Image (tube, rainbow, N blue to C red):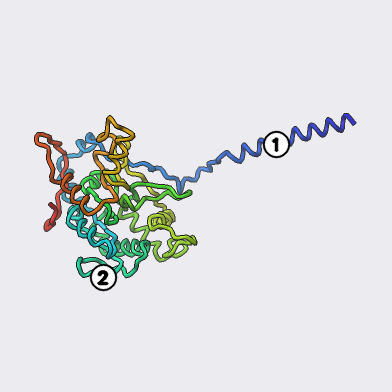
Amino acid sequence: MLSESSLFLKGVLLGSILCVLMTMLAHIKIDYGKRTHHHERHHLQAPTKEDTLKISEDERTELSKSFRVYCIILVKPKDVRLWAAVKETWAKHCDKAEFFSSENVKVFESVNMETNDMWLMMRKAYKYAFDKYRDQYNWFFLAHPTTFAIIENLKYFLLKKNYSQPFYLGHTAKSGDLEYVSVGGGIVLSIESIKRLNSLLSIPEKCPEKGRMVREVSEDKQLAVCLKYAGVFAENAEDSKGKDVFNTKSVGIFIKEAMTNHPNQVVEGCCSDMAITFNGLTCNQMYVMMYGVYHLRAFGHVFNDVLVFLPINGSDND
């Protein structure tokens, strides 16, 4: 009887040990060496001043003339006042900017997408841009009319990036396992990424016009799903100090947050000096930003930037 009890206890002990081992093994992630979908450039940083100083004078001259960004602004008729503000402010600094509207609007020139669905508008806009401008522009910036963009800072950020590589960058966010670039801060795609996206638009299994989910999925998340099938992954853009340069909030909100979180460093703790976008702006705020970024100057403060991006001939860039 004693031996039977002993055997029973040994069995219980061995079973417990085996259970613990199985639990531990279940939490061990095995790397089989396949890195096809590994994301190696999760955080992308802007070049430093030292990086730009290493560029030769001839290269700087060539870059200042040849670096071209095409801007896509998705609008709806209800956004007509914001539409006008964007057209009169930062859009002038794109090498070419076009508005893509849900319907024909007589007040402003736009490309009619003939749909109210934001994902369908985005798909059609990217296809239009690729079909018409793939040989003219290497970088494509997409935004909503509530976004203010500083295109010169975007060009500076992209300075050392190779457009023949599949770049998809901006302000990243997560939804479950999906990492995507928030459209609120603007989305940047290289020509290689748009090329890959275009090749999938006609394949509903990989890039459906409507999401497979019962609930509605935002256009930026659906874009991320399509690009993931093409081997293109979302990357967060930061300055050399690690601060975000694509922002999904307005400067005013960042200042309020800094006053609470960094009361002794409100301006320094607010935002990056090389910020590219801010979002959630009203029409009035668009003009305030335009004045502050492009017109207000403090006498005696000279930044001596080693590279200047020149507007194309015939541009109304101010």
Closer to viewer: mark 2 or mark 1:
2
Q: Quadrant of residue 48 in the image?
A: top left
Which residue in the protein does label 1 denote? 18
Asked if 252 appears above or below 20 in the picture, the reply is below
Residue 168: image location, x then y, percent = 35, 50
Q: Residue at x 36, y 51 (%)?
A: 182
**Count of marks placed on residues:** 2
Residue 249: image location, x then y, percent = 31, 46
- In the picture, the disc for residue 216 is none
* Circle 2: element type: loop
Q: In which quarter of the image is the N terminus?
A: top right
Q: CA–CA distance between discs 2 and 1?
A: 68 Å
* Callout 1 crowding tier (Cα within 10 Å): few <14, some 14–19, many ≥20: few
Q: Quadrant of residue 191 in the image?
A: bottom left
* Most foreground residue, 28 or 33: 28
Residue 127: image location, x then y, percent = 32, 63
Judge from the rendering whether residue 284 lies leftward or rightward of residue 227; answer left or right.
Answer: left
Asked if 287 appears above or below 121 in the picture, the reply is above
Q: Residue at x 40, y 66 (%)?
A: 202
Which residue in the protein does label 2 denote? 104
* Most foreground residue, 55 or 214: 214
Q: Residue at x 42, y 52 (%)?
A: 231
Judge from the rendering whether residue 258 lies leftward or rightward of residue 216; answer left or right.
Answer: left
* Circle 1: element type: helix
